[in-house]
Amino acid sequence: MNDANLSQEQIEDLVQKQEYLYDQELNKIISNKQYYIENVQDYSTEIFSLKKIISINKRAGNGYAVIRDEVQLKSYAIVKNQNILIKNVLLSLDVPTINDFEEKLNIYTAQNQEALSKITTKDYKDILALQDDSSILKATKQNIREYYALQEINSDFIAFLYKAENKLYRLNKYSKYHIIKPVVFIDSFTSVKTVDRLLEPYGLSVVKLIIIFLLILVIYFLRKVFYIALQKLFLKIDFLSRYSEQILEKLRKSIEVLILIINVNMVIYVYNNFSSIEEVSRIFNIIYGFYFTLIIYIIVNTAAVIKLNTFEKEKSNIKSELINVGLKIINFFIVIIGLLIVLYFAGVDLTAVLSGLGIGGFAVAFAAKDTISNFFGTLSVLFSDVFSQGDWIEVDGKEGVVVEIGLRVTTLRTFDNALIAIPNGIFASKDIKNWNKRKLGRRIKMTLGIKYDSKQADIKNAIKEIKEMLQNHPQIATKDTMYEYKIEYGHMAKLVSKDDLEGIKKTLLVYLDEFGDSSINILIYCFSKSVDWEEWLKTKQDVMEKIMIIFENNSLEFAFPSLSIYNETESGKEKI
């Protein structure tokens, strides 16, 4: 190539040939990477022999022979230095990213140039100008030409390393994944080389496109294997085995999106010559952290919902509110842990974050004292079993049906269809009236006023008939009404009444109660068997209708508020 008589076309052909030879040698070295790392040729035997010969020729005064061997010695040193550079470059290929490889390459090429500068301190070009036909001088000139050629080859080799650094890093990955031979085979086709030249400006190659396509196919087909493995994992976990199908169904969309993200990540990784880009990797790690949290969230909540439905069907004694609140607490911790994972992948120093939380914990606790009070109120409600979801309660002047017991508030649906949110801390300090904590007996209380002109015998008979009617009424609770207790109370100390504990009322009273301003009053005090409001209303109506018939049969009339006025005269009092 340095021959001045060569044409431009010949030089271009030689350049292409040189590129081809470099490529071939590069493929050979990468394919046998470990051999070149472990077997660095250092020419120690040749160097040792030359040094002995130089010493002999110096003593003999053979100047040209000394220069010949001295130049040869330096040529060996240049080649040895190149072999050390190759070894170091091969070792540095296993770094995580191509940027790291570039840094290593800069260091090792600088070391190579520094060593080369120490070898090439002396100029031998004046020897090439000598006109002497002696064989020693001819051999000396030949060694000098090879010596200068090796210096140029060293420079070309370093230039080639920088030009092919991406390819070098990529080929090493192929070797690591044991696909170097198929890759070299594909690259050997002329048509592939032609297409590669067109794709090279876009950072692509035929091999890259094939690998990307195969990766997409493999990940797509591995999706089913992943589902099967996930299902087997759920079956091994006791509390998830019964819900594996439902959980997988809920996870399907999230996993499909996750697989798509993995595909995109792998395409970028291959496109960037099997090297990770720090910023891109951080973004994908954040996404993976988010999806990991989402998957755990879906698994826990799906299992909890199914479990709640099971309790509802089996009418279990376990309170659904307890599971609801427990689930909210678990979800809170899942979100916190997921947030910490995302922050970690985002590069945030978690030690500083956790330390800050510890220092600011007191201030936060003081500022959130009401929230903490409500949380402990929630625990008090759940473990004291004062009321449950669906109960009709009255507290602090508010009345309605319990819709949900939350971590901070309990929501009531009032009878005029409004929604009230009551902080749970109130339940720890206020009286709570629960109308649903009764099993048998809803009170019916009446005061019946009859006129003062009613006969005493009729009143007495009416009271007797009303009492008999109530005792024989199928929907009125009496002392003969049987009730099967659900709980054994033998272990409970100082139990006053099982009836009061479970909410059983059978009292039945019908008595003449008082002489009112306008009537003689009869007290009726009894309980319907049903505690349901509509059933209670029907029973109460039926009782009232029967009382009206009894009064009618006994010639009794209901009194109403009235006022009698008497006019006092000389002959006596006259009623007006």
Image (cartoon, rainbow, N blue to C red):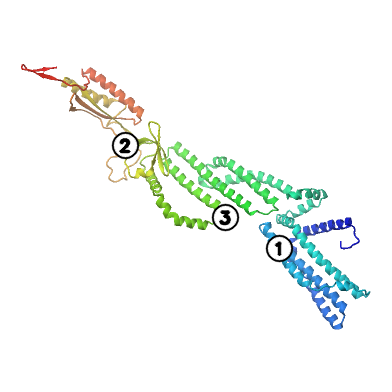
Contact check, label 1 and label 3, Cβ < 8 Å? no
SS under mark 3: loop
SS under mark 2: loop
Q: Earlier in the sequence, mark 2 or mark 3?
A: 3
Q: Quadrant of residue 180?
A: bottom right
Q: Quadrant of the C terminus?
A: top left
Residue 91 seen anywhere in this rendered image of the structure = no
Residue 105 lies, with reference to residue 138, above or below; the image says above
Residue at figure coordinates x 22%, y 28% from the top left: 523
Q: Is residue 75 left or right of residue 502?
A: right
* Residue denoted by label 3: 347
Nearest to the observer: residue 273 or residue 545: 273
Q: Residues within 10 Å of mark 3 (few under 14, many from 20)?
A: few
Indicate the position of residue 336 as horizontal and vertical percent values.
50, 50
Q: Work out which residue is located at the far bottom of the displayed protein and give it.
A: 59
Indicate the position of residue 8 as horizontal and vertical percent values.
88, 56
SS under mark 1: helix
Q: Is residue 411 left or right of residue 154?
A: left
Nearest to the observer: residue 432 or residue 166: 166
- In space, the residues marked 2 and 1 are separated at their CA atoms by 87 Å
- In space, the residues marked 1 and 3 are separated at their CA atoms by 28 Å
Q: Is residue 200 left or right of residue 546?
A: right
Contact check, label 2 and label 1, Cβ < 8 Å? no
* Residue denoted by label 2: 503
Q: Amino acid at mark 1?
A: Asn
Q: Amino acid at mark 2?
A: Gly
Residue 65 lies, with reference to residue 258, above or below; the image says below
